[in-house]
Image (tube, rainbow, N blue to C red):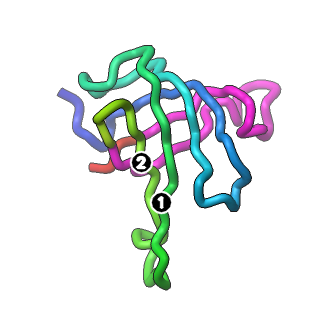
Amino acid sequence: MTPVAEQIITVRGAWDGHVTDPERVFRGKIVHSDLAELRQGTTAEIRYGHSTTHAQNAAEHGTYTLTAGSIRVPLMSFTCRTVGTTGHHSTDDAQDADWQAVPLG
């Protein structure tokens, strides 16, 4: 079994809402998952939750959480995989793309 820190979930989808909107949500489908409970084709949402108080360190700023049905997975990172590939130097996050989620260990 792969350690949690090395497990990867790939979700194809796009962000909905302005970057400053606290209700902004990423919606997509899981295209790959190292977690058995998250199957390919499952609809998923990712939201960024942040603290309403002053953050003392980076860990307190906020977290991404992947939700698929009744399953909630806090994430260590959530990054677009399309950026950095040939011909892609930036991303319009409102367009479908593959995003990589790394569960928080």
Query: CA separation, marks 1 and 2?
Result: 8 Å
Using the image, tell me which numbered label, if any, was put on residue 65.
Answer: 2
Residues in magenta? 73-101
Q: Position of residue 8 (x, y in %)?
A: 39, 32
Q: Nearer the viewer, residue 34 or 29?
A: 29
> Could you say whether the residue bearing mark 1 is in a helix, strand or loop?
strand
Q: Position of residue 6 (x, y in %)?
A: 33, 37
- The mark that comes first in sequence, 1 or 2, is 1
Residue at the image position 78 percent from the left and 40 percent from the top:
90
Going by the image, does 54 lie left or right of 81? left
The quarter of the rendered structure image containing the N terminus is top left
Residue 80 on the magenta span: yes
User: Is there a contact, CB below 8 Å, between mark 1 and mark 2?
Assistant: yes
Q: Residues within 10 Å of mark 1 (few under 14, many from 20)?
A: some
Residue at the far top in the pictured view: 41
**Disc 1 designates what residue?**
49
Q: Nearer the viewer, residue 49 or 36?
A: 49
Going by the image, does 3 lie left or right of 80? left
Q: Nearer the viewer, residue 61 or 105?
A: 61
Residue at the image position 27 percent from the left and 49 percent from the top:
105
> Could you say whether the residue bearing mark 2 is in a helix, strand or loop?
strand
Using the image, tell me which numbered label, if any, was put on residue 38.
Answer: none
